[in-house]
Amino acid sequence: MRLIQISDTHVSASHQFFRSNLAATATWLRSQEATLFVHTGDLGMDSAGQEVDLYASRDWLAGLGAPFHCVPGNHDVGDRIEINPRQPVTGARLQRWRDAIGPDRWLIDQQGWRLIGLNAMLLGTDQAEEQAQYSWFDKALETDLPVAVFLHKPLFIDAPDEPPRGYWSVAPQPRQRVMASMRRARVKMVASGHLHLHRQQVVDGISYVWCPASSFVCGESQEELGGERRLGAVVHQFGVDAVESQFLRPEGLDDLKIEPVQQILYPR
Ligand SMILES: [Fe+2]
Ligand SMILES: [Fe+2]
């Protein structure tokens, strides 16, 4: 089974700064044969703030000619209130996502694997939806199949027991909750987006893959987190009981930085 993962397209209805990268990604995707396509969030530039970006993202995806399984990012449905007080995750934002894109968590059994999409933006919100997702996740992990999990924010940057990493990863408490559940199943991979960096590392037998962005990279506004600061995609090849992940670079990408236009796109 060949699965293509892309992330962080940041499609905008009104700004065109990264349109050449989106066009190059779309051209490349249309040439690819894959069993499944996954998008790990931040589909839109500011869908949490303006609905038009959500619909622009949906239209961009529809033009790819292949069905995508998507999990939401902070710019799609908002973030924890302490991270982004102006755009918290709300029932209205979640409903908008579900109406336009589809479920924010999902489970697919395919060719001897269980693939799970998790809504990382609920983690640490203390909302009823967060609890509902934990119950759903525990049930989804009741399987003998090997499992791969997809979510927007990485569970951690360097190590599962590290202190809070603020904006960049899932907070320690929900991280421990998710990882305790994962220990009850044969989880082989956790693949995320959000950082606009590529890295792969194996921790306790699980492959943690950071899928790079398709739109822009971060420069000096991003602290040093490790990983490669390049645009691209990841191809996951699923075997009998193991998955191999490979960075791929669609032709025509330009590693444009966010900083020159950051104040226009994300004014403080
Ligand atoms: Fe992003
Ligand atoms: Fe993000």
Image (cartoon, grey):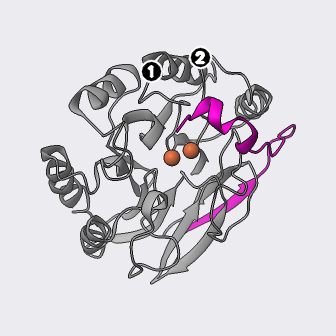
- Left or right of 112: which side holds 42? right
Mark 2 C-beta to ligand 1 under 8 Å: no
x, y (%) of residue 44? 53, 30
**Residue at the (74%, 48%) spot, across then down:** 231
Q: Which residue is mark 2?
A: 13
**Residue at the (15%, 55%) spot, across then down:** 135
Which sits in the foreground, 45 or 220? 220
x, y (%) of residue 123? 29, 55
Q: Which residue is mark 1?
A: 50
Quarter-of-image position of residue 185? bottom left
Q: Which residues are magenta?
A: 243-268
x, y (%) of residue 115? 40, 52
**Label 2–label 1 contact, CB within 8 A:** yes
Q: Amino acid at mark 1?
A: Gln
Which sits in the foreground, 46 or 150? 46
**Residue at the (43%, 62%) spot, across then down:** 166
In the rendered picture of this protein, how many numbered marks are placed on residues?
2
**Residue at the (71%, 35%) spot, across then down:** 261
Q: CA distance from mark 2 to mark 1?
A: 9 Å
Which numbered dot is residue 200? none
Q: Secondary structure at mark 1?
A: loop
Up-down relation of residue 189 to residue 259 (above or below): below
Q: Is residue 244 magenta?
A: yes
Which sits in the foreground, 38 or 40? 40
Q: Residue furthest right?
A: 252
Q: Amino acid at mark 2?
A: Ala
